[in-house]
Image (cartoon, rainbow, N blue to C red):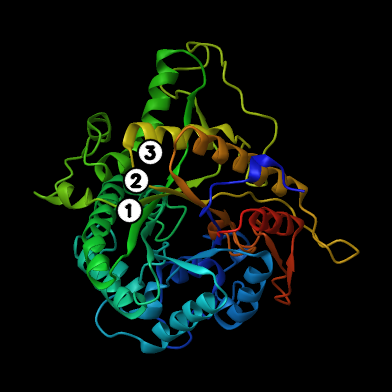
Amino acid sequence: MIDKNFIFPKGFIWGAATASYQIEGAWDEEGKGESIWDRFSHTPGKVYNGDTGDVACDHFHRWPEDLALMKEIGLHAYRFSIAWPRILPAGRGQVNQAGLDIYSRLVDGLLEADIEPYLTLYHWDLPQQLQDEGGWPARTVVDAFCDFADVLSRALGDRVKYWTTLNEPFVSAFVGYEEGRHAPGHTDLHEALGASHHLLLAHGQAVPVIRANVPGAKVGITLNFSPQAAASPSVADRDAANWADGHINRWFLDPLAGRGYPGDMVKGFGDEMEFVQPADLETISTPIDFLGVNYYTRNIARSKDVGEKENAPVTAHPNEEHTEMGWEVYPDGLYNILGRLHFEYGFPAIYITENGAAYKDQVGPDGRVDDPARLSYIKRHLEKVSQAIDIGVPVKGYFAWSLMDNFEWAFGYSKRFGLIYVDFETQKRILKSSAKWYGQVISANALD
């Protein structure tokens, strides 16, 4: 039985999400070009166990089977991303019609199954040729992205109404160009800052392109959020928490909301940011129809500027419960973020575009995959979404991450986030107990 905490407003959208490189496979089929993740995962030492996305979940060939599982769960919507080099192998110029046709068939299949497609243009798989020309730190990539948005929105806009420009530009910019843990694997702060600006500029320029091609389109962007807690009341720890908040949250939120880049962060980065040109910030703040929220955990910030002996004793402690990623399970963080986004920024609508957890799932002797920890994780976070709605936050939908176990970036196939278990050797799929419970929640919240 589903209790009253899981009865949401009429019209609330229930879905699940994936990303192209993580599930599709077929990395060099049907005219697809190389992406930065193809190059990165094929570079020894970059991904756990030498794993690649060459096959992944083989969704490229098995999407009808996956669509049937979506329907079995009862999803209202499916959030998926487009492999840019599958459409424009060189990043710009010649369109690969075979690539367009694949996504066109997927969209038709979704609509026939009464599942609304929510399309994300960019989820980290930049065409390698564009990277060879400078990648996101180079301003030329902005026009290439707008061309990509134009091609896709013209081809699919008659059927797709919900468009997300970018997924987690923080990760693309800072994890890819400063930390080096993701493709393209660079470690240069100036490059990361340039990448972050050009990602936001590409978003701002693409929004009117999509709207021009898709009458009635709903267009937004998805950011990853991590609420920051100071480890103690000390000035040093409070400064550390404010810095982390500025880096992960405000650096992208503020320019989108028309406030420009936060001054404390610009000063702290100490970069001239010569790549910012007149009118860029106005373009970046082009109004959006919704903000996508990806939330997994919070961060407790401890200053590295003073030693433990000089700093105050730690007073903020993580819960003992952690996921397989080592992330604290902290549902209150989602409630806090949603309230902040609404009352401080006022975006017109919010979708939870990713929320989920990795655990060590196994197939039992009876062939079932029971994942009570994931079920509990999702349940407790949905309770917080419900509470946020009760105080007036305009949350319009929830997309579980992820529809299925997949290639988890630098962790390869070692982490399982899916509602659906995937045996990567045989490609057999099994609905986990969390998927069945989620289906009950959806059933209790019919759209009509």
Q: Earlier in the sequence, mark 2 or mark 3?
A: 3
Kindly identify which residue carries mark 3: 249
Which residue is at 55% across, 40% downward? 385
Residues under numbered marks 1 and 2 in contact, where contact means CB atoms less than 8 Å apart: yes
- First in residue order: circle 1 vs circle 2: 1
Q: Among all residues in the image, which is located at the extreme right?
A: 365
Quick one: quadrant of the C terminus? Answer: bottom right
What residue does disc 2 label?
348
| The quarter of the displayed image where residue 96 is located | bottom left
Type of amino acid under label 1: Asp
Looking at the rendered structure, the secondary structure element under dot 1 is loop
Residue 422 location (% of width, % of height): 70, 68
Q: Position of residue 258 (x, y in %)?
A: 21, 41
Instruction: Say what secondary structure mark 3 lies in.
Output: helix
Compare residues 115 and 403 and report the one nearer the observer. Answer: 115
Mark 1 Cα-neighbour bin, 10 Å: few <14, some 14–19, many ≥20: some
Residue drawn at (26%, 47%) of the image: 190
In the image, residue 167 lies at what x, y percent?
41, 56
Q: For the residue marked with disc 2, what is the amino acid?
A: Pro
Between 222 and 40, which is closer to the camera in this rendering?
Answer: 222
Amino acid type assigned to the residue bearing label 3 in the image: Asn
Measure the C-alpha gap from mark 1 to mark 3: 19 Å
Q: Residue furthest left?
A: 278
3 horizontally vs 123: left or right: right
CA–CA distance in space, label 2 to label 3: 18 Å
Which residue is situated farthest in the front direction here?
448
Q: Earlier in the sequence, mark 1 or mark 3?
A: 3
What residue is shown with label 1? 289
Residue 43 circle label? none
Q: Are the residues at dot 2 and dot 3 in contact (C-beta closer than 8 Å)?
A: no
